[in-house]
Image: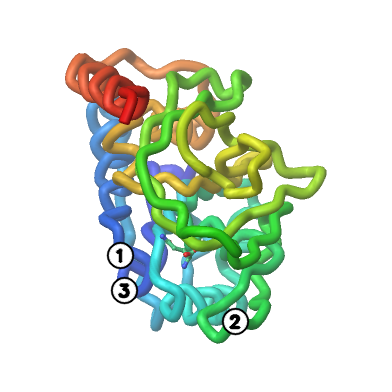
C-alpha cells in the first residue's frame, strides 16, 4: 500500500461503466472508510495514463466496441501490467475480465489481444446470450459467502492451467463453458461475469481486496445485516422454481 492512503483506481469509466460497475469503486471506498482506512480514488479516463502506484484497480463491463477500444488503450499504455508486476490488485467484471485474459473476440468478429494478466481465453458463444441471475460458491480459499449477481454476456471464457475458477455455479452460466465455473483468479488478479454491481451485493469481496492491499488477515467487523438480507432474498429468488 502507498504510504498515505489506500489508492483505488477506477479504470476507463468512459468506456467500461455500462452496467453500473462503478458501484464497485464506491463500495471499496466505503468499506475502507468504515474501517478508518484512509482511501483515495482516481478515475482514469481512456485518454489518460494508467497510474502504476495504485493499490486496487477496478475495471467494469462494457459493450463490444468500447471493449475493443479499452483493450487497445490498455495494451498501448502498459501501466496496468506494470502495476500488477509490482503487486497491485485488480478486480474486473465481464468485458474487463475478458480484456485481462490472453485474447477475446472483438466487435468485428476478430481475435483481440488482451493483457494476459489472467490465464483465460474468451470466444464468442454460439448459443443464447448468458443473461440472468447467478448464484455461486466462491473458491473456499477466499473464505467468502455465496456470490449472488447478474450476468449479461455473449462471450464464453476458457480457463488455462494457472487460472483458478473464482466460483462454482449453483445457478447461471458464468464462464459459459458448461463446466460449472464462474470467473477466474490468480494471486492478485480477479475476474467475474457478475454485474449488479457485484460488490454492492457482495461487499465481502471489497473487504478481500482491502485485506490483500493492507496485507492483513482480518478487518474490524461492520454491520452487514442489510447485505445479508439482500443475499437471502437473491438466493431465494434465484432458486425459486420458474
Ligand atoms: N461484450 C462482452 C460480451 O458480451 C462483454 C459484455 C459485458 O461486459 N457485459 O461477452
**Which label sits in the foreground, 1 or 3?**
1
Nearest the eye: 126 or 217: 126
Residue 34 in picture, x, y percent from top left: 23, 27
**Which label sits in the foreground, 3 or 2?**
2
Is 224 rendered above or below residue 125?
Answer: above
**Mark 1 Cβ inside 8 Å of ligand 1:** yes
Q: Quadrant of residue 202?
A: top left
Badge 2 crowding class, 10 Å Cα cut-off, few under 14, some 14 to 19, many 20 or more, is few
**Mark 2 Cβ inside 8 Å of ligand 1:** no
Residue indicated by mark 3: 14
Single out the residue that lies furthest toward the right.
161
Left or right: residue 29 versus residue 6 is: left
Residue 35 in picture, x, y percent from top left: 28, 24
Disc assigned to residue 18 = 1
Residue indicated by mark 2: 109
Is 83 rendered above or below residue 110?
Answer: above
Q: How many marks?
A: 3
Residue at (53% x, 43% y) in the render:
174
Question: What distance separates the C-alpha of mark 2 from that of mark 1?
Answer: 21 Å
Q: Earlier in the sequence, mark 3 or mark 2?
A: 3
Is 175 rendered above or below residue 101?
Answer: above
Nearest the eye: 106 or 185: 106
Q: Quadrant of residue 235?
A: top left
Disc assigned to residue 215 = none
Rendered-image quadrant of the C terminus: top left
Amino acid at each position: 500500500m502507498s504510504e498515505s492512503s489506500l489508492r483505488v483506481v477506477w479504470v476507463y469509466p468512459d468506456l467500461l461503466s455500462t452496467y453500473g460497475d462503478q458501484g464497485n469503486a464506491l463500495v471499496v471506498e466505503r468499506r475502507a472508510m468504515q474501517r478508518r482506512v484512509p482511501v483515495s480514488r482516481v478515475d482514469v479516463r481512456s485518454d489518460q495514463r494508467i497510474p502504476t502506484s495504485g493499490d486496487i484497480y477496478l475495471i467494469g463491463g462494457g459493450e463490444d466496441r468500447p471493449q475493443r477500444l479499452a483493450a487497445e488503450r490498455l495494451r498501448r499504455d502498459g501501466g496496468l501490467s506494470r502495476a500488477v508486476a509490482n503487486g497491485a490488485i485488480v478486480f474486473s467484471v465481464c468485458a474487463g475480465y475478458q480484456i485481462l485474459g490472453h485474447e477475446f473476440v472483438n466487435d468485428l468478429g476478430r481475435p483481440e489481444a488482451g493483457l494476459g494478466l489472467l490465464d483465460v481465453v474468451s470466444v464468442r458463444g454460439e448459443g443464447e446470450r448468458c443473461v440472468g441471475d447467478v448464484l455461486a460458491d466462491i473458491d473456499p480459499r477466499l473464505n467468502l459467502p455465496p456470490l449472488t449477481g447478474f450476468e449479461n454476456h455473449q462471450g464464453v471464457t476458457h480457463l488455462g492451467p494457472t487460472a483458478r475458477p473464482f466460483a462454482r455455479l449453483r445457478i447461471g452460466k458464468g464462464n459459459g463453458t458448461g463446466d460449472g465455473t464462474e470467473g477466474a483468479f490468480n494471486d492478485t488478479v480477479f475476474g467475474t461475469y457478475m454485474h449488479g454491481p457485484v460488490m454492492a451485493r457482495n461487499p465481502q469481496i471489497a473487504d478481500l481486496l482491502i485485506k490483500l492491499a493492507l496485507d492483513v488477515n482480518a478487518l474490524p467487523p461492520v454491520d452487514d445485516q442489510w447485505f445479508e438480507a439482500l443475499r437471502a432474498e437473491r438466493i431465494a429468488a434465484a432458486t425459486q422454481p420458474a
